[in-house]
Image (cartoon, rainbow, N blue to C red):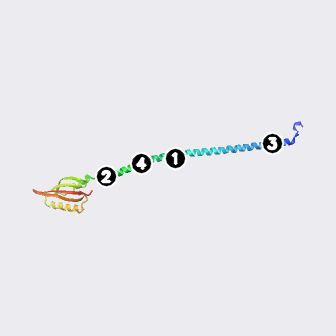
Amino acid sequence: MSKMDLNLLPSIAKFQAKRIGLKKMLNKVMMIMAGLWLMVVAVIFGWWLLTNLETKKQTNKAGIIKQELANMAEEIVINQDLKSKSKLVGEVLAARFEYGEAFRAIENLFPEGISMDKFELVSKKSVDVEGSITQNKMVDVLEEMIEEINKGENKDFSKMSLDSINYNLGVWKFKVKLDLKQ
């Protein structure tokens, strides 16, 4: 054997062997700790990245919803404006006097034998009518019409009054005042 193979200091050699074993074990622990550290860092970074992505996604979603809400608000304002304008138009149309219907009712009021010479719209609900009758029996028909209208039996007129009636050369001239139901 050579001098070098000989272990003259057994306690130092044991200490060195323990030191080398301890170093190996410390290296393993350090590697495990570094691995755990890297894994923790990777998990934290991954968690941060996921939450950041989700936050951006939710922020974008909130922005889209906010924009849609703003668009809806404009549409709601436009709809409300249209509703109020259409309501006003409806009220105007409901309150509007229908001249055409009134004139048709006046033209169709008198039967054959009673002629209407002229009529004048005094107000929205009142009309003066002048006419003539050539047959004496039609004067009775005129009187009956006045009674029917004043009883409420006519769908277009609520009141009829005889303002004047004259007889001249076989022709009866009359003037009546009609109140419309409208």
Nearer the N terminus, badge 4 or badge 1? 1
Which residue in the structure is indicated by mark 2?
A: 93
- 126 to the left or right of 57: left
- Category of crowding for the residue at label 3, using alpha-carbon neighbours closer than 10 angstroms: few (below 14), some (14–19), many (at least 20): few
| Residue that protrudes farthest toward the right in the picture | 1
- Category of crowding for the residue at label 2, using alpha-carbon neighbours closer than 10 angstroms: few (below 14), some (14–19), many (at least 20): few
Q: Name the amino acid type tagged 1.
A: Ala
Q: How many marks?
A: 4
Q: Where 77 sits versus 148, above or below?
A: above
x, y percent for residue 32: 72, 44
Q: CA distance from mark 2 to mark 1?
A: 45 Å
Which residue in the structure is indicated by mark 1?
A: 62
What residue do we see at 89% from left, 36% from top?
3
Which residue in the structure is indicated by mark 3?
A: 19
Q: Name the amino acid type tagged 3.
A: Arg
- Category of crowding for the residue at label 1, using alpha-carbon neighbours closer than 10 angstroms: few (below 14), some (14–19), many (at least 20): few
Work out whether residue 96 or residue 123 is closer to the camera in this orientation and state it.
Answer: 123
In the rendered structure, find residue 174 and report the number of the disc placed on it: none
Q: CA distance from mark 4 to mark 1?
A: 22 Å
Nearer the N terminus, badge 4 or badge 2? 4
Q: From this viewpoint, is residue 128 visible? A: yes
Which residue in the structure is indicated by mark 4?
A: 77
Tell me if label 4 and label 2 are in contact, CB under 8 Å: no
Nearer the N terminus, badge 1 or badge 3? 3
